Amino acid sequence: MAKAVTFQTVDENSAGQRLDNFLLNHLKGVPKSHVYRIVRAGEVRVNKGRADVAYRLELDDVVRIPPVRIAEAKPNPSAGAVSKAFSAGKPIPARGSSLDILFEDDALLAINKPAGMAVHGGSGISFGVIEGLRALRPDAKFLELVHRIDRETSGILLIAKKRSALTAMHAMLRGDTGDAIDKHYYAMVKGNWPDARRHVRTKLTKYVTASGERRVSADEDDGQESHTIVTRVEQLPGATLLDCEIKTGRTHQIRVHLSSLGFPIIGDDKYGDFALNKHAAAAKNGGLKRMFLHARLMSFAHPLNGNKMTIEAPLPKDLNRYIDYLRNI
């Protein structure tokens, strides 16, 4: 940890970044709660004044970072698992290792994220993909998530390696430019999906249950506009494999759209058919112990050179195994 006060001048790679994320990058291993505490206490200064953790840094801002001493951290099983998956004896794994790198250049990194791994820490999870990457690449000046996918979802996750790439990708995601980002998912749903192709535009709203769990529901009165294009890929006994192209990026969008229409994703523990999920998890019934939702393809213009790119993530073995099981019923 830092042994004396340091002053960091914000460069172009950090301009626009939140103060808390900037500090987490410079104070490796310091818990987020501790970072928030020293900011609230006024120990961190920006241009000699107090600043909120959500303050967006500007080019040439000077950030005062105090000395930080914390107790030796106990081994974190989650962090160890991520490090093992990432490293395999190398700074970055080769294709075919536990965590596939699908694409990398000087602006972007595309990872084939496994199901069950959070993309970032928070909500009781101290270590996610982005924290793992930063730990394994301590010399990287900039690593930020371009977008997020659910912890239970596998597939393509994009990370920006430059601030300019991040802002360009976010502009495309917001629809501020003429370029669009196409995002396709595979989902296996309960029942026989009736249409070859359907536009689902059910409005969605977020809410919190009495137990504090965050959920999403269909709400045509007060919900946000949401759009998913659903294409039938294969009809199987009691189930349908679908391609879902999301035109908006609402939380749990595909899961709630399909469930609200009576076709829940198999293995979905929030919006699914729990009896069917339990049946599918049995070894003799395919052994599907996760949600069948996979971010399979992203297509977009490269944020820096404008070249058209298409990145694909193959289906994981467990999802292929479940498809084979259904085909052989």
Image (spheres, helix red, strand yellow):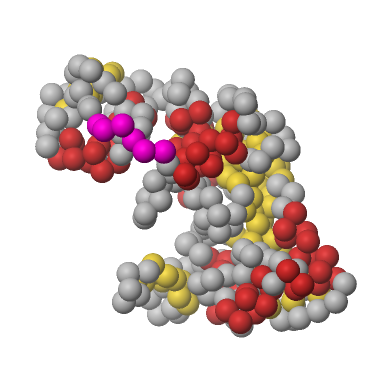
Q: Which quarter of the figure has residue 292?
A: bottom right
Residue 161 vs residue 164, the one in the foreground: 161
Q: Is residue 36 magenta?
A: no
Above or below, comparing residue 112 to residue 253 in the picture: above
- Measuring 49% from the left and 50% from the top, which residue is drawn there? 118
Of all residues, the one furthest to the right in this rendering is 328
Which stretch did the figure color magenta? Answer: 70-75
Q: Which quarter of the figure has residue 152?
A: bottom right
Looking at the rendered structure, the number of numbered marks drawn on it comes to 0
Q: Position of residue 102 (x, y in %)?
A: 68, 38
Q: Position of residue 25 (x, y in %)?
A: 37, 29
Residue 153 vs residue 218, the one in the foreground: 153
One can see residue 252 in this view:
yes
- Measuring 53% from the left and 66% from the top, which residue is drawn there? 253
Above or below, comparing residue 237 to residue 55 in the picture: below
Q: Position of residue 38 (x, y in %)?
A: 18, 35
- Measuring 56% from the left and 41% from the top, which residue is drawn there? 158
One can see residue 19 in this view:
no
The answer to whether residue 216 is left or right of residue 109 is left
Q: Position of residue 236 (x, y in %)?
A: 81, 75
Q: In which quadrant will I find the N terminus? A: top left
- Measuring 85% from the left and 76% from the top, which residue is drawn there? 329
Q: Which quarter of the figure has residue 287?
A: bottom right
Main secondary structure found in the magenta portion: loop
